[in-house]
Amino acid sequence: MTVKSQIEDFKPSIPLIQALRAPGMRNRHWEELSELVKMPVRPKKDLTFSKCLDMGLQKYIDMISKVAEKAGKEFSIEQQLDKMENEWKSVRFDVLPYKQTGTFIIKTSEEISQMLDDHIVATQSMSFSPFKKAFEERIAAWENKLKITQEVLDEWLACQRSWLYLEPIFSSEDIIRQLPVESKRYQTMERIWRKVMKQAKDNPEVISLCPEARLRDNLREANKLLEQVQKGLSEYLETKRMAFPRFYFLSDDELLQILSQTKDPKAVQPHLRKCFENITRVKFEDDMRISKMYSAEQEEVAFRKDIYPVGNVEDWMCEIERIMRETLRQIIHDALEDYLERPRKLWVQYWPGQVVVAGSQTFWTRQVSQALEKKDIQRYHKQQLSELDELRELVRGELTDNARETLKALIVIEVHARDVVINLIEEKVMDVNDFEWISQLRYYWTDDHLYIRAVNAEFRYGYEYLGNTPRLVITPLTDRCYLTLTGALHLKFGGAPAGPAGTGKTETTKDLAKAMAVQCVVFNCSDQLDFMAMAKFFCGLASAGSVACLDEFNRIDIEVLSVVANQIATILRALCLRV
């Protein structure tokens, strides 16, 4: 017999060899095989292929192949499980000491989360395999282990984020004193946190540490306490904001910076600009009383009454606001009286820039009204040109920086005033009730207060300190915008200036707020905005009495815009009803 014929004879037996030599064949498969062929088949040392042929196993090749295939599939599952378990043995937390706290934080990578997700998906796909029976318990246990690890990791990272945020807050004695209940909860939580982190330091292996039920329970308890602490903290901040509404314009972190340093009143200095239109700092004397305010241009205005920063910060911040308004009211009153006594070119340099502009507009209103009543507007026009020439000469001379800024703003206002008078002459206006005149912003000092009128609308001057800022050049279009917006405000509506980008919609709104001396808060809207943030912002606006300029309003997401529009409508209805 040739070799070729021997090979040909042997060929039909190859599938049997392959089946019996399948790598996944375990005792259970041999037992199953023995039952199928009705004779004992065991992988012993003396079991040769020749014996297998003598036992007549060749005729059972189909049954044996099925068992071998099943063994191969089960072996594949077993290998996958072993591979996953081995991969996790090398995965450890990076446990790092955190500042000077005496405890640690964990540094996790995206790779761990990704690995967890991939392995959970792989394990779940195994659980649907028709060959899972032999590993059913192991698959279920492994899937449960991975899911608990994922759950623990989520709880852990959430706990760490909250702890990192709250740790510096509750390190402040002032906060501990002001929030005793929350402080106790935080201390309880921190004990749990330190215990958990010690466990992580001692055993950083992720898969052996995380599936512990006690660890999960500890982290859940810590997160529950943190939630209560944060809720109490938010309520505490809300009470502070209700007491001094301008705190709504500060973030939680900025407000906490102030509240955590109540023994140091100077801690408010960096945040004053967000609370007031243009107070960048205040002067603290040696005895800590507050005597002056400064603008961004370093203009100095002395308070008519000193403020003592004692007690709650929100209380003396309210006092700063009240004294700021009262100081400006008194200074405007004194400046109006001084206008008749002091030469104009000295008067414009003596008083703060805001007062000079407001005082000049008040006298302009008075003089135009008198000229219209006396029918000699032409004479006043000549006087006005002479005063404008005097200002031009003055601004060319040697001046302090603040005096020059005041004159620049005043000249812009006076040039517009001149244009208004020229228009009155061209339109042959002879009556103080003529629309061409009453449609202008007019300033009147009556009943110890400054009032602004436009047509039938009247507003009390806001006395918000504006500093020494430039003013917008006013065009006929600006006048129309002012007229529309003042009419809308009088009727308790809002306004929506429209036009191409960069044409001055925002600046016009801000300048009208300056003309009325009210705080103007510009809020840049975006598609990331949520209605809760807007609700907080509107709460601050309504409580503080400020003007808001909602820039890029059209960018707000349509679902959020619907809620925001409803919030604005509610505020406007309340204004109409004088609630």
Image (cartoon, grey):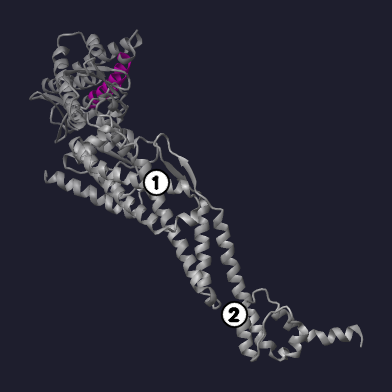
Q: Nearer the viewer, residue 228 or 480?
A: 228
Residue 7 as seen in the image, left or right of residue 407:
right
- Residue type at mark 2 is Arg
- Residue type at mark 1 is Gln
The reply to whether discs 1 and 2 touch (Cβ–Cβ < 8 Å) is: no
User: What range of the chain is rendered magenta?
Assistant: 403-423
Q: Nearer the viewer, residue 338 or 244?
A: 244
Spot occupied by residue 514 in the image (x, y as percentages of width and height): 25, 29
Instruction: Label 1, secondary structure: give it.
Output: helix
Judge the density around disc 2: few (<14), some (14-19), many (≥20) Cα neighbours within 10 Å: few
Residue 364 as seen in the image, left or right of residue 1:
left
* Residue 379 sits in quarter: top left
Residue name at image x 25 percent, y 18 percent: 283
- Considering only order in the chain, which callout, 2 or 1, is on the residue closer to the N terminus? 2
Mark 2 — residue? 28
Prevailing SS of the magenta stretch: helix
Spot occupied by residue 64 in the image (x, y as percentages of width and height): 66, 85
Residue name at image x 17 percent, y 21 percent: 327
Question: Can residue 512 be seen from the camera position used here?
Answer: no
Name the outermost residue toward the left: 447
- Image quadrant holding the N terminus, namely bottom right
* Residue 433 sits in quarter: top left
Q: Nearer the viewer, residue 65 or 542?
A: 65
- Check the image and report above or below for 386 versus 535: above
Mark 1 — residue? 160
* Residue 429 sits in quarter: top left
Residue name at image x 27 percent, y 32 percent: 173
Q: Nearer the viewer, residue 579 or 481?
A: 579
Spot occupied by residue 318 in the image (x, y as percentages of width and height): 18, 30
- Check the image and report above or below for 42 versus 210: below
Spot occupied by residue 455 in the image (x, y as percentages of width and height): 16, 34
